[in-house]
């Protein structure tokens, strides 16, 4: 009798799994139109970092309607929804970022942003030029689907809606570090965290990821060069900080081309801003330049910092000037835990189809999702939003006025998140 019962259970199990997957697909299909509508509404009304007041209120209201435990004001405007599933299991966190950028939207979308806001004392246009509107909508859709299947959800799910991923303005705190500081990864303690990013140059519906180091650290640096002011017609009577700065900039590029072990990991040093002087016939006393450093290895990151400081100060000293270098680390290397990736990559294949999931190369873009990886194993992946048939080389990049994504397959992101929650719960 016992043997017959085991055989019966063995025969029934696949039927039950199929029924559960079918129900999951039906729930996701049912929320797809809402996800697209949410994304377009949020796109039309973007908000800058640490100023996501209306976006956060919309998110919190929706999560409350779903019956979740909702926490607001974490990391200034962050929102967290907590779903306690009907089955025992781990605590899984899913994260979406909410902020937009001070970028003018040049497109002709019916839901184009025409909003503006104050940013560092200036009135600027505001646009979701990086796709965070899609991330919010996908996570809201995920929360709705998983809430409707609460009895089958293993463990606890934390839905983290994070502000200021693009960096808080001025000297303000914000982003993932502030949310972590205020306990977002605790009470209950997160066992694993997952995140995604829409990509305008990856074909729609496809998923890409990389095990290990995936995205670069982001450091912002400032170099202040002090010389001696003089008349532009008599440079020998002064010390020209502009000429010194030009030599420093060239020197920084030799760190990349001659000192960094590029077969190990890439390095990028970019000077993006220079300010000096008030008149064309006056050699100024001081010059300030600012830029960014991108590395994909933490040891190389520190080596680059040390070499930049050494090079700037010595080049300046050789001309009789002085240079000071300050470096502010905005994000760490986004690192996908290899064990977690190996375990969960099949879940992405189940969501998007095996032929639509692939491992990619690392990127010098940066993400403050990296900080969550200090608290729990993390897995961050990319979802394609480039229209079918478009040449990736001609697709507008993120952070540009022409940035565009096709939102017809945002439901793939919803399914990926749901699949990860269920599958991690089974294996946890």
Image (cartoon, rainbow, N blue to C red):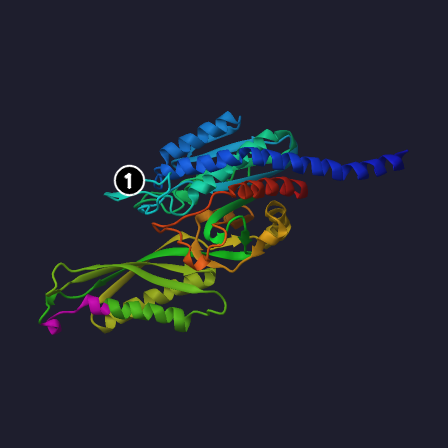
Task: Name the residue at 81% across, 36% down.
Answer: 9
Where is residue 104 drawn, in percent x and y? 30, 46
- Residue situated in front as seen by the camera: 88 or 180: 88
Q: Which residues are magenta?
A: 234-244
- Residue situated in front as seen by the camera: 305 or 399: 399
Horizontally, residue 19 falls left or right of residue 277, namely right
Query: What count of labels does the image hold?
Result: 1
Task: Name the residue at 40% across, 55% down.
Answer: 218
Quarter of the view holding residue 114: top left
Q: Which residue is mark 1?
A: 116
Quarter of the view holding residue 324: bottom left
Task: Name the residue at 71% across, 38% down.
Answer: 17
Horizontally, residue 154 falls left or right of residue 395, namely right
Q: Dot 1, crowdedness within 10 Å: few (<14), some or many (≥20)?
A: some
| Residue 228 visible somewhere in the drawing | yes
Quadrant holding the N terminus: top right
Q: Main secondary structure of the magenta part?
A: helix
């Amino acid at each position: 009798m016992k043997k017959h019962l085991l055989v019966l259970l063995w025969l029934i199990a696949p039927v039950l799994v199929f029924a559960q997957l079918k129900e999951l697909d039906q729930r996701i299909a049912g929320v797809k139109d809402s996800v697209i509508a949410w994304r377009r509404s949020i796109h039309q009304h973007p908000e800058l970092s640490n100023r996501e007041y209306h976006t956060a209120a919309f998110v919190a209201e929706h999560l409350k309607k779903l019956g979740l435990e909702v926490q607001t004001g974490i990391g200034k405007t962050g929102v967290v929804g907590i779903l306690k599933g009907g089955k025992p299991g781990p605590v899984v966190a899913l994260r979406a970022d909410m902020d937009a950028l001070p970028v003018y939207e040049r497109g002709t979308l019916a839901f184009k942003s025409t909003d503006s806001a104050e940013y560092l004392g200036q009135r600027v246009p505001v646009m979701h030029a990086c796709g965070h509107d899609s991330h919010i909508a996908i996570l809201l859709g995920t929360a709705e689907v998983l809430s409707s299947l609460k009895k089958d959800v293993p463990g606890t799910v934390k839905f983290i809606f994070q502000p200021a991923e693009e960096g808080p303005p001025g000297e303000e705190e914000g982003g993932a570090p502030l949310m972590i500081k205020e306990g977002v990864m605790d009470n209950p303690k997160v066992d694993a965290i997952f995140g995604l990013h829409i990509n305008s140059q990856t074909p729609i519906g496809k998923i890409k990821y990389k095990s290990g180091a995936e995205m670069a650290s982001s450091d912002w640096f400032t170099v202040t060069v002090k010389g001696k002011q003089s008349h532009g017609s008599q440079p020998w009577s002064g010390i020209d900080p502009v000429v010194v700065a030009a030599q420093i900039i060239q020197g920084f590029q030799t760190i990349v081309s001659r000192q960094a072990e590029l077969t190990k990991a890439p390095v990028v040093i970019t000077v993006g801003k220079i300010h000096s002087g008030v008149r064309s016939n006056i050699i100024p006393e001081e010059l300030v330049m600012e830029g960014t450093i991108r590395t994909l290895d933490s040891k190389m990151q520190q080596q680059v910092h040390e070499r930049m400081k050494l090079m700037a100060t010595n080049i300046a000293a050789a001309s009789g000037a002085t240079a000071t270098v300050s470096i502010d680390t905005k994000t760490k290397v986004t690192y996908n835990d290899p064990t977690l990736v190996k375990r969960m990559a099949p879940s992405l294949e189940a969501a998007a189809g095996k032929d639509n999931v692939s491992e990619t190369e690392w990127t010098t873009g940066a993400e403050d999702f990296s900080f969550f990886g200090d608290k729990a194993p993390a897995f961050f992946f990319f979802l394609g939003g480039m229209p079918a048939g478009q040449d990736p080389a001609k697709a507008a990049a993120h952070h540009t006025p022409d940035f565009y994504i096709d939102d017809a397959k945002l439901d793939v992101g919803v399914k990926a998140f749901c699949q990860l929650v269920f599958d991690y719960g089974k294996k946890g």
